[in-house]
Image (tube, grey):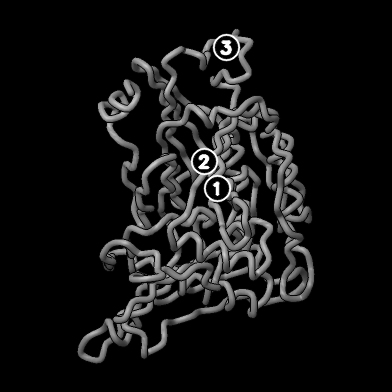
């Protein structure tokens, strides 16, 4: 979840404003690929949305429709107009909410990324853009070797800066439970055809961290969130505006996790841990079995960066919690909450139940007028049809 630079009391006022009637402001800027601001095109925005999908290779994507009856938005690469939008430009979208208690707008940057497509139809121009992961989908090209003993954090920084030109990082100095930095157990060589982003994500997963670009275009690496970041509630003072749908997907359920690590140099014996869902859990081997025979649904993991039994157990417990939660899919429509990030832990609280889940999919509406809801747990088209937009353009 984005902090937005707010104190605890300011955040309380901001989130209260999100759940009540408020004034919105959508700012759209054209940037260079290095993040320099060229111009604002906010005044021409008709509609748009930002899709967030934690399971996609590129987490965020945006669709924006602009009204341009005078063809003042130039798309020719030779155009001197700073508002020109083409392949060497990025789009940044900020979602502002006026908080009366603070007497000011609070902005959440919900999208920053390169333009990947555009089309014109009459007076309207539609721009497609993807998150900054798209800038790291190319090949390494110049081979690189990440040496043994190098910190994983340092390896990711070197790779993303030297091969993808990234300069904006939010990556802490991660250490293990003994206070030691997490390092590469062996050298990792990447040939010229290796994909930069795929290699960076692989490094992050090797130490059980989440790597993604947030809405501001900052490369973030963090622990998988276990604390609830936001609570969705229905009714007066809540943010849920539809029925809550719950689906159970049993095909991929795991109730037993077995982790094998690598012992420190000079020590014998395998580092390992096995964690089983407790008997009381409805998805435990004992509750899912029959005739007294437990049903163990096992996932085996080998991770050379795990060097102690305690670390192996902690990893297995987190993975088991994640796998069990993935069996439950929650979806509903809500008032927009623009400062959420993919994989944030959130919860739904209704008079009948309370359920925690990881936020995998949601969409942020960008229409300057009206109040379309934010789909949570699924994606759908929020922008109106081109026919509707054309009617608006004739006014």
Query: Front-most of 81 and 297?
Result: 81
Q: Quadrant of the N terminus?
A: bottom right
Task: Report, in whole angstroms, how far the alpha carbon at label 2 lies from the one at label 3.
Answer: 26 Å
In the displayed structure, would residue 263 be above or below residue 310? Answer: above
Which residue is found at the position 39% from the left and 64% from the top? 239
Q: Is residue 158 left or right of 378 when viewed as pictured? A: right
Extreme-left residue of the structure: 291
Point out which mark residue 26 bears: 2
Would you name the residue on which mark 1 appears?
Answer: 96
Secondary structure of the residue carrying numbered label 3: loop
CB under 8 Å between discs 1 and 2: yes
The C terminus, quarter of image: top left
Residue 224, horizontal then vertical, whole percent: 56, 65
Foreground: 253 or 213?
213
The x and y percentages for residue 103 are 62, 56
Label 1: which secondary element: strand
């Amino acid at each position: 979840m984005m902090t937005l630079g707010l104190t605890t009391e300011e955040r309380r006022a901001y989130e209260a404003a999100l759940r009540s009637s408020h004034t919105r402001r959508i700012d759209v800027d054209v940037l260079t690929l290095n993040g320099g601001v060229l111009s604002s095109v906010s005044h021409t925005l008709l509609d748009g949305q930002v899709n967030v999908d934690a399971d996609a290779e590129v987490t965020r994507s945006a669709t924006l429709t602009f009204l341009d009856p005078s063809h003042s938005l130039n798309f020719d690469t030779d155009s001197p107009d700073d508002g020109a939008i083409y392949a060497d430009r990025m789009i940044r979208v900020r979602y502002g909410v006026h908080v009366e208690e603070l007497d000011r707008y609070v902005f959440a940057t919900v999208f920053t990324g390169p333009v990947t497509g555009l089309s014109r139809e009459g007076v309207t121009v539609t721009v497609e853009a993807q998150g900054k992961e798209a800038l790291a989908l190319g090949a390494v090209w110049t081979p690189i070797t990440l040496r043994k003993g190098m910190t994983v954090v340092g390896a990711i920084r070197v790779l993303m800066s030297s091969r993808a030109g990234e300069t904006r990082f939010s990556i802490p100095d991660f250490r293990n439970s003994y206070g030691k930095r997490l390092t590469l157990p062996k050298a990792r060589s990447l040939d010229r055809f290796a994909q930069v982003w795929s290699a960076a994500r692989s490094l992050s997963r090797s130490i059980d961290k989440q790597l993604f670009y947030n809405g501001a275009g900052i490369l973030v690496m963090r622990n998988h969130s276990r604390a609830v970041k936001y609570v969705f509630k229905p009714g007066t003072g809540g943010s849920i505006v539809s029925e809550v749908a719950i689906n159970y997907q049993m095909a991929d359920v795991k109730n037993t996790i077995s982790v094998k690590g690598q012992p420190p140099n000079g020590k014998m014996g395998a580092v390992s841990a096995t964690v089983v869902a407790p008997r009381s859990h409805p998805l435990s081997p004992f509750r899912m079995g029959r005739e007294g025979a437990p049903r163990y649904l096992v996932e085996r993991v080998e991770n050379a960066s795990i060097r102690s039994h305690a670390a192996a157990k902690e990893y297995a417990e987190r993975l088991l919690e994640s796998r069990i939660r993935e069996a439950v899919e929650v979806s509903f429509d809500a008032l927009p909450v623009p400062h959420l990030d993919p994989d944030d832990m959130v919860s739904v609280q209704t008079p009948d139940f309370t359920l925690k889940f990881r936020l995998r999919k949601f969409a942020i509406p960008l229409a300057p007028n009206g109040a379309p809801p934010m789909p949570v747990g699924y994606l759908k088209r929020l922008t109106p049809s081109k026919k509707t937009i054309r009617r608006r353009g004739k006014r």
